[in-house]
Image: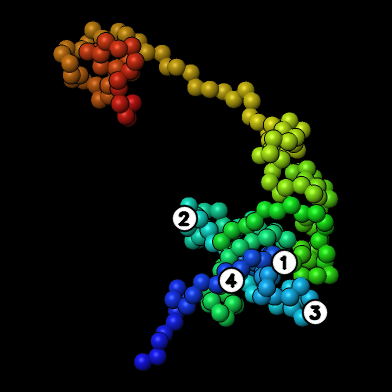
Amino acid sequence: MAEQYFMGLDGFIWFVGVVENRNDPAELGRVQVRCLGYHTEDLTLIPTADLPWAHVMHPVTDPSMQGLGSTPSFLVEGTWVVGFFQDAKDKQQPVIMGTLPGYPQSTPDTTKGFNDPTGTYPSENREFSGHSLDESDVSRLARGEDSEDHESLKKRRDIISKEVPIAIEPYNTETDYTQVVGPKRETWDEPHPRGHESDESPYPSAKYPY
């Protein structure tokens, strides 16, 4: 009997690559990836349109079902990713497991593969993050740079809610104390707002639904 292979038994072949397109016609959040070693940078031999569509793996906190969670992913053209092929040696069904930050030193060469075809990422000056070339992809806030002058921080502070009205403490009369006989109320459905009569603590002991 011939040995049978299926996904999970046919080996684990992984890759590192660059996202070149995220406009998924199926609207599944897939991206087209050019994989190092498996694809050439020559766009005449393998244009971006011919690259395989890669599904993006989400964490267990995201069910990826019927609009729940954080779908789709936030990959952009030019993102470096790492993943594996579901079909192993056929290498036509990639799955992306994560992204790889780097240290970009030049703007994208749109005449070659492994670059953002739109020429957007990376750029010499990103408006909101403040990033330029020759620096880490990690946020400047995380690196302790431009903490007070960072555009993202300033915009967040501009939308802070201020002078929000708060609830006031209800007025609780004490006249009903004279109506209570014994540790159990006979005519009240809810505990007294100040707690049970036997409580010596100044803090209320009343429970839900109070």
The location of residue 146, given as percent across then percent down, is 75, 35
Mark 4, secondary structure of its residue: strand
Is residue 23 visible in this depiction of the protein? no
Q: Residues within 10 Å of mark 2 (few under 14, many from 20)?
A: few
For badge 3, the amino acid type reads: Thr
Q: Nearer the viewer, mark 3 or mark 2?
A: 3
Residue under the image location 25 percent in, 13 percent down:
199
Which comes sooner in the sequence, label 2 or label 1?
A: 1
Q: Residue at x 64, y 56 (%)?
A: 100
Residue drawn at x 30%, y 26% as measured from the top left: 207
Amino acid type at image mark 1: Glu
Q: Residue at label 3?
A: 44
Which of 54/87 is in front?
Answer: 87
Q: Say which label, 1 or 3, has the lower sequence index.
A: 1
> On the image, numbered disc 1 is attached to which residue?
20
Give the CA separation, mark 3 to mark 2. Answer: 39 Å
How far apart are the alpha carbons under marks 1 and 4? Answer: 14 Å
Q: In this rendering, is residue 44 above or below 165?
A: below
Label 1 or label 4, whichever comes before in sequence order: 1
Mark 2: secondary structure: loop
Q: Are marks 2 and 1 in contact (CB under 8 Å)?
A: no
Amino acid type indicated by mark 4: Pro
Report x, y in % for residue 153: 70, 35
Would residue 184 appear left or right of 47 to someone viewing this image? left
> What residue sits right under mark 2 in the picture?
60
Gap in Å between the C-alphas at discs 4 and 2?
A: 19 Å
Residue 43 appears left or right of 200: right
Q: What amino acid is at disc 2?
A: Val
Residue matched to label 4: 94
Residue nearer the viewer, 164 or 124: 124
Label 3 element class: loop
On screen, residue 16 versus residue 120, left or right, reads left
